[in-house]
Image (cartoon, rainbow, N blue to C red):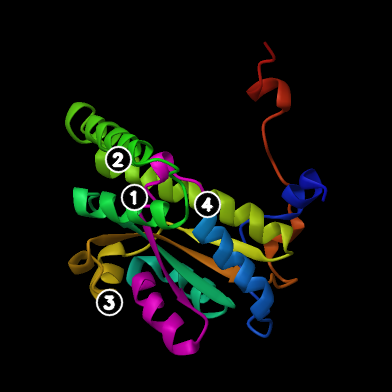
């Protein structure tokens, strides 16, 4: 695998080919990326709404109405569309559910290790809740880590993507009842395959030079 070649080939798709669908086997790998992505303290403060049917994509497209209508085709023409939602809080009940899953997966060889993990996770989270007072923003950062992993993973499979933040997020929250479930919509990622008429495919990639962004110590 040549990561440089893969990264040079990927870009934010402006036009998806509505006739092309991601295979079931490839999308199983996409779901593995979403599930296995790392997060700080293993909080995993995310939930994903995935649509690959016309009906499902039309529901997500409700977040692209009015001012955001330029994004509507990127939802409707994509093969699969993912709403990334973030938890609005991580209370102790949720923390214990993480701990129970870790225990079930064999993460703790001794009870004291389980207790230490739980105490450390609570301590670290409470620093963001009470001291730094940035808990919602910190949780969103974890979801963006997941999106970054998704972009690279999709590109390695030859799948194109577009992240959309220009959305009516409240409309998505209402459409899917997210707030009542303890989540809020953060962004939408469309996946599929580019159309050759997409203007962005013809433009060269532009990034700062290595010497501008990297200092070798």
Instruction: Say which quadrant the C terminus sits in.
Output: top right
Give whichever of discs 2 and 3 has the lower sequence position: 2
Q: Residues within 10 Å of mark 1 (few under 14, many from 20)?
A: many
**Foreground: disc 4 or disc 3:** 4
Residue 22 visible in this rendered orientation of the protein = no
Q: Position of residue 71 (x, y in %)?
A: 47, 68
How many angstroms separate mark 1 from mark 2 (CA)? 7 Å
**Foreground: disc 2 or disc 3:** 2
User: In the figure, is residue 168 to the left or right of 110?
Assistant: left
Give whichever of discs 1 and 4 has the lower sequence position: 4
Question: Picture quarter containing residue 21?
Answer: bottom right
Query: As displayed, is residue 72 above or below residue 163?
Result: below
How many angstroms separate mark 4 from mark 3 (CA)? 27 Å
Q: Which residues are magenta?
A: 38-65
- Give the camera-side residue of 25 and 17: 25
Number of numbered tags placed on the structure image = 4
Question: Picture quarter containing residue 192?
Answer: bottom right
Q: Which residue is mark 2?
A: 118
Secondary structure of the residue carrying tag 1 is: helix
Q: Which residue is mark 1?
A: 99
User: In the figure, is residue 160 to the left or right of 185?
Assistant: right
User: In the figure, is residue 29 to the left or right of 168?
Assistant: right
User: Which mark is drawn over residue 67?
Assistant: none
Residue 46 visible in this rendered orientation of the protein = yes
**Foreground: disc 3 or disc 1:** 1
Q: Which residue is mark 3?
A: 175
């Amino acid at each position: 695998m040549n990561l440089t070649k893969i990264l040079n080939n990927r870009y934010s798709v402006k036009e998806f080919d509505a006739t092309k669908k991601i295979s079931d086997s490839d999308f199983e790998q996409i779901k593995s990326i979403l599930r296995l992505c790392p997060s700080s303290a293993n909080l995993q403060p995310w939930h994903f709404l995935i649509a690959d049917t016309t009906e499902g994509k039309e529901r997500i497209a409700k977040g692209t109405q009015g001012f955001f209508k330029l994004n509507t085709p990127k939802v409707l023409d994509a093969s699969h569309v993912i709403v990334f939602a973030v938890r609005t809080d991580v209370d102790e009940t949720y923390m214990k559910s993480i701990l129970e899953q870790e225990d079930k997966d064999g993460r703790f060889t001794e009870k004291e290790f389980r207790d230490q993990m739980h105490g450390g996770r609570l301590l670290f989270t409470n620093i963001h809740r009470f001291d730094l007072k940035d808990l919602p923003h910190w949780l969103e950062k974890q979801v963006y880590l997941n999106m970054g992993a998704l972009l690279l993973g999709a590109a390695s499979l030859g799948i194109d993507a577009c992240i959309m933040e220009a959305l009516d997020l409240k409309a998505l929250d209402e459409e899917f009842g997210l707030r009542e479930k303890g989540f809020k919509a953060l962004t939408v990622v469309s996946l599929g395959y580019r159309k050759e008429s997409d203007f962005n495919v013809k433009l060269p990639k532009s990034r700062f030079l290595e010497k501008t962004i990297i200092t070798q110590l």
